[in-house]
Structure formats: structure tokens, C-alpha cells
Image (spheres, grey):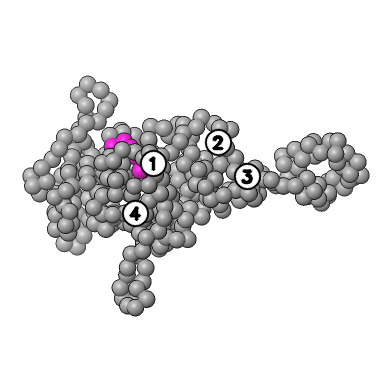
Amino acid sequence: MKKIIQENRCLYKYKTLYSKNYKEELIRDSNGDIQLNEYTLNMLLNGEICLQSPLKFNDPFDCLVPIKFELSRKKIYNALCKRKDLDALKEKIITDYDNDFDWYYEDFIENTKFPKIKEKFTHEMVDQYGVYCLSKNKDNVLMWSHYAHNHEGICIGIKTERFGKKQKLINLSMTEINPNNQNEKEKINIPAIFDKVHYVSTHKKIKPIKYPTMSQKDIYNSIFQKSKCWKYEQEYRIVAPRDQIEYSEANNNKAGCNKAYIDVNSISEIYFGINTDIEAARTLVKILRKKLTNFENIQFYKMIKNKDHFNLENYKLDSKLIY
């Protein structure tokens, strides 16, 4: 079976590394050490990722695909007849049911609350799924600005060969209380879909989902379609049902996300931004060296500005020299 990306290929996640106070000073803990971002550390140390509801995305059109309701003529006719503003026309509706039905159908669709019902239904449908976004691109200036704290964060490279051999289907894991020991947690595998995002120029190019005969595959396909204006992100997505994933209370207000885990050994590269604080970079390397058994397999890089073009470049760092 053809793979969607080459083996040994990395996909990338842009992350915040630390925060600053109102004086633009690095936030430190009680010992004076730089306080690194909790969620970034959890990803690097444990493989923890956060699958968000599409309703939390910064693109208001993301995943809100058109729905085609497959309602019978009888059901639509009954709905038309319940409208008070059509009482006077009821006899005409009955008379013209076969001859002029399309006109009444369009009137019902356009002039009632039906569009709002469709929107509400779409929201509820896509909210059942959690999405984790990755990029094929590690050196995009806009993405470093938007997702990596104005180039002060990091970009994490993840080996996709660890996602599994079958096209589109991968295994995530989640923690679950051990029934034999309430103080222990064990990891169980959950299925997820992994694929690249397809970019379209207009909503009309997205195939509508038919209700009620739609399948889960139809919903998944819709989640992997996005406006062409985001094409520069070269995005890939991991998608899984949210009811199968552990809900993260810590992110309740911030993200409404669900926690899952990738193989921590799949993390193979870390890129520091052009504005990353050197002390914060050293603190991160120190933590990873101490806690990761696969530390020697991680390559570190530093992003720099291209001298001639509005592009970013990178050069390899010696982790021993960083620390």
C-alpha cells in the first residue's frame, strides 16, 4: 500500500517554549530557574499531545463543511404546512405539490431557521472529533511567528515512520486507571486517522455530507479539507473521536482539548527559533539530557536569517556545547 509520506520523513510541530511577564522578562520559578512551557515539556518528555475540537481553531471555516439533508418530499411538505405564514397558501401547496414543489422547498430552506439549524448541526458533528495539527514545513516565517511565540519558541520534528505502516491509520495511546491498582495508570491504544490536508479555493468545491446517510468516513474526509489561503502551512492532521480520548481539565478554558500520546522516541529533531533565549535553550537541553533515555538520538538546530532572501535557514548544534 502506498504511503502518504516517505519513511524517515519528519513532520513538525511549532511550540511555545516559555512565557514573559509584562516587563518582557522571562518567568522563573521559586528557585530562579526559567519556567518552561508545561505542555511543550509534556510533549517532549512523555509524547503527550492535545487534540483540539475544530471549533477552537483560528479559522472560522475550518471543518464546517456543507451538509445536504436528504429529507423526503413528504417530510418537507409537512414542515411547509406547519409554517403559520403559509396557512393562507396551504390549499395552493396541496394543489401544486407535484408541479411547483421546488419553489416551496427553496423558500423553506432560505427563509426559515433551517440555515441556523444546519450550522448548529455541523458544529455538534465536528465537535465530536479531536484534531492535532502538524506541518511538513519547519522553516516557514509566518508559522514561526504565529505558533512559536514570535520565533522565541521551538519546532519539534517527529518521525512519521513511528506512526505505523498502514496508510492513514495510526495508533495513539491514552492513560487509563489500572483496575487492579487505582494508583497506577496504564496506556491503551486508540485508533486515529492520519493524513494530509487538502486545500480548496471555495466552499463549493467541498463535497457535501449527506444526512442521515453519512458515514464516519465522510466526516473524516471533511475534516481534512481547508481553505486555499492556508496552503503555506502544508498541514497534516491526526484525528480521533474525542469520547475515546482523555479530557484535559487543565486546558478546559484555554483549548477544550483531549490528551493522547505518541511514541516519545519518534521525536528526533528540535529547532530553536532565531529569537529563542539562549538560557532557556540550555535549560531545555539540560532537562532532556537528564530525563530522556533517547536523548542522544535527538538532533538540535538553530534557525537563522538568510542573508539574501526573506527565508529562514538552520544549522546543526552540538548539544554538548549548548549545555
Mark 1 falls on what kind of element?
loop
Residue 275 vertical position relative to residue 289 in the rendered view, above or below: above
x then y, percent, for residue 168: 41, 45
Type of residue at label 2?
A: Ile
| Mark 3 vs mark 1, CA separation in Å | 29 Å
Amino acid on which the number 1 mark rests in the picture: Met
In the image, the segment drawn in magenta is: 133-138
Query: Rounded to the nearest whole Å, what is the CA distance between mark 2 and mark 4?
Result: 29 Å
Q: Can residue 225 be seen by looking at this rendering?
A: yes
Find disc 4 in the rendering and name its residue: 49
Which mark is first along the chain, 1 or 3? 1
Image quarter hosting the N terminus: top left
* Type of the residue with mark 4: Ile
Residue 286 x/y as whole percent: 14, 54
Q: Which residue is mark 1?
A: 1
Indicate which disc, 4 or 1, sits on the residue closer to the N terminus.
Answer: 1
Q: Nearer the viewer, mark 2 or mark 1?
A: 1
> At numbered mark 4, what does the secondary structure look like: helix, strand or loop?
strand
Q: Is residue 272 magenta?
A: no
Give the residue pinned by disc 2: 206
3 vs 4, front mark: 3
Measured in 3D between alpha carbons, the distance from the residue under mark 4 to the one under mark 1, in whole angstroms, is 28 Å
Q: Residue furthest front?
A: 1
Q: Residue at x 40, y 62 (%)?
A: 246
Residue for point 52% across, 47% down: 217
